[in-house]
Image (cartoon, rainbow, N blue to C red):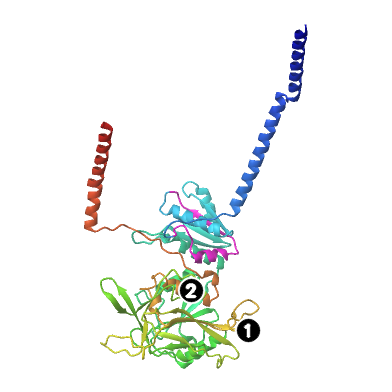
Amino acid sequence: MEKKNIDINKNEFKAAGNMDTEAARPSTKGRKAIIFANVTVTVIIAIVIFVFVSYINGRHYAHFDFTSSGKFTLSSKTKNILKDLDKPVTITMLFSPGEIFYNQIKDILDEYAFVSKFIKIEEIDPLRNRTKAEELAKELKLEALELNTVVIQCGELSKHVLQKEVMERAFPFKFIGEEMFTSSVLAVSEGKQTGIFFTVGHGERGINEFERHGFSSLAEAFKRDNFKTIELDLLAKKEIPNTCEALVIAGPSKPFSTEEINIIRKYLENNGSLMVMLEPGLAPNQPTGLKPLLNEYEVKIRDDVVIYNKVSMPMLGLQLVTEVYITKEEYQEHKITKDLEKLTTVFFGACGIESTHSHDMTGLGKKKYTANTLAYAPDQAWGEVTIKAGVKPQSNPEEDLTGPISMAMAVEPIDPNANMGSGPVSNDKGKNEGAKLVVFTDADFAANEYLRNPGNQDLVRNSINWLTEKESQLGIAGKTPDFRAASFSPNQMKLIFWLSIGCLPLITVITGGLIWWKRRR
């Protein structure tokens, strides 16, 4: 009896325990509700994180270009111009997918929109969407739009860049779209062109001369920066027009008259800007009548010196040349040369230039000017004082001009009431007060024959932009992409043939035989 009672008590205890456990355990519906709530909260949190990350990524993201030539990177000049935009510019692509350079044009225009919030990119396929193309033509007041065109608009102004203009016409048809697009953006956003006047009548390089010594290529480069180039005969005009933002004297071989010098002097006294490119050639610089005027602005031309340079050439050893190569070490710190460190500028037969360091400026009132060197000649160069026909020049440190030899200078006014080294004098409108000058002791470097050297064009274009206070246009212009083709000698071709036809199959046979032999054992 006692055992039976014990068993009954145990059963009752187990039943009671089970009841307590079941009571403590939540129902199936409760568990499902908890799981559903957890999943819902997790999904909501994930959505919030995704939206937040997408928002941040949409506003703050970076581009990386790992190509050796920077194919997908805009030039510093283009970036400066785009960042300075303050008006909306619409760029419309009228290209059909599959057309030559379609992908390059689309990629580079997307970069424009990435850099500036004022750039809006639209795309119209003229073959599939004729209605939209006709609406654009009507908006531009044109009867029809040419196919494969990029239309750039700002207000009522528009520019059309044709497919043939974004490529070089000679094989291998390199893409040069960035230069054309940036030029068009400048033209429609600035509107009125800035006037650049070139003096004539003294043997200067002509802006309409297409020969190798002419300046027609430089004039075209200036036009791409939205400048209007105009020839000016000082004796006929008797004055420099008010529309002249900068005066250029390009390689004169005959002297200016006293009357002409006085006209230029008056222009500079009225806050004018002057670029002078002298050309000594292979003989001492011909008198131009400009020396006294330049001396007034702290610039002294060494017209008794022609600079020679020693360079090491393959198979020829050390050679004496008149080409002077300006690289990173020779460029001096200035807004004009800021982005030119990676480029090489080549001067061809230059003379020396110095600063007079005079602060008692006769005829200029209380204004003071500072002349800063833009570029020096390399250490191995020297200035030859005595040049004789048929006699090979030799460096003579006791007589010749030794380094450092300056070949280009920029002159600007400084505040006479401020400490030395302060910025230029400015008026209430932010414009600089006083004259600005850039003086080069060579003109060949800007001629048609040599302008395409890596740094030549950028140096002279930066100089004119600095003179006209278009500092947003300073920098390196868009470059033509490199066309890299493999070139092999006959022996190299023979080696490639035997490696591909003989060696590779033989290696495969030997490897297969070794594996078969090993498995057979």
Identify the residue at horizontal 25%, vertical 43% (top origin).
Answer: 505
Q: Quadrant of the N terminus?
A: top right
Q: What residue type is labelled 2?
A: Thr
Q: Picture coordinates of residue 120 (x, y %)? A: 56, 56
Front residue (pair 452, 496):
496
Q: Which label's residue is closer to the chain start, 1 or 2?
A: 2
Label 1 Cα crowd, 10 Å radius (few <14 / some 14-19 / many 20+): few
The residue where tag 1 is placed is: 418
Q: Report if residue 195 lies within the magenta region.
A: no
Identify the residue at horizontal 37%, vertical 84% (top origin).
Answer: 382
Q: Is 43 rendered above or below residue 125? A: above
Q: Is 231 rendered above or below residue 521? A: below
Q: Is mark 2 on a helix, strand or loop?
A: loop
Q: What element carries label 1?
A: loop
Residue 337, disc: 2
Label 2 Cα crowd, 10 Å radius (few <14 / some 14-19 / many 20+): many
CA gap, disc 1 and disc 2: 25 Å
Tell me which segment is drawn in magenta.
70-97
